[in-house]
Image (cartoon, rainbow, N blue to C red):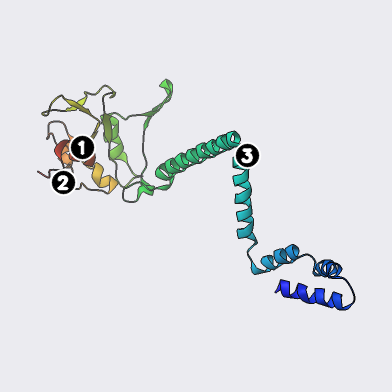
Amino acid sequence: ELHSHLVLLVEDQERRGLTPTEASRLARLRLGGVAQIQEEHRDRRGMPLLEETVRDLRYGLRALRKSPAFSFFAIATLAIGIGAGTVVFTFAAAVLLRPLPYAQPEQLVRVFEANPLRGWTRNTASPANYADWTTENTAFTGMAAYEQFSREGSGASDVFLTGNGDPQPLKSLSVTGNLFGVLGVGPFLGRVFTDEETFEGKGQVVILSYGLWQSAFAGDPA
């Protein structure tokens, strides 16, 4: 369309007595330049973003070929930055954004015992104090307690899995029988603890984690 309009302008100038060269130059000036008209026409069609992106990519590729060392460091910096951002987002999503896998997790709180004289602000409560809390509690719908046993445990005996080669140290929790009820969850198989099993000597009962069940017992339901 632009070419046809240019030809008509050239023919009109030639009829006015100009040479073909002069007629072509004057026609292009009056038309405003073919490249400029094409650019304006592309803008009207709504394609400038795509074409600018293509031009930027071409320029970037030429710059990469001209300065390979600089390009390597630039790409490495981008890769490190993107990788670090991905790690931070993954951690934030897992810890801050993803809800805990319990019923009504927004209502769960963790309570510690404090001892200002010794500078303790997150100390594990003694069994006697926990018993007092449950008796005098008026703020919570339920309270449960746990203590973590591990190889680094806090004065507790280590827990080991035996019967198949060398004893295997395990991380474990000693919990009150109502823990699963307070959390609002149940086991994949079997039953939860009973309140009677909270007390020492009332039964040596364990609930295996899914990972240990699969790795040490091959997922055997028996």
Q: CA distance from mark 2 to mark 3?
A: 69 Å
Quadrant (top left/top right/bottom left/bottom right) for the N terminus = bottom right
Q: Position of 121 compared to 22: left or right?
A: left
Amino acid type shown at disc 3:
Lys
> What residue is shown at x 78% (from left), y 64% (from top)?
33
Residue 31 coordinates in the image, percent (x, y): 80, 69
State the residue position of label 2: 191
Look at the numbered discs 2 and 3 and tell me whether their residues touch, using CB distance below 8 Å: no
Q: Position of residue 197 (x, y in %)?
A: 15, 37
Give the amino acid type for the residue marked by disc 1 in the picture.
Leu
Give residue 42's quadrant in the image. bottom right
- Figure quadrant of residue 35: bottom right
Crowd rating for badge 2 (residues with CA inside 10 Å; few <14, some 14–19, many 20+): few
Mark seen at residue 66:
3
Badge 3 crowding class, 10 Å Cα cut-off, few under 14, some 14 to 19, many 20 or more, is few
Residue 52 badge: none
The residue lying toward the viewer, choosing from 164 and 210, is 164
- Whether residue 153 is situated above or below residue 58 in the rendered picture: above
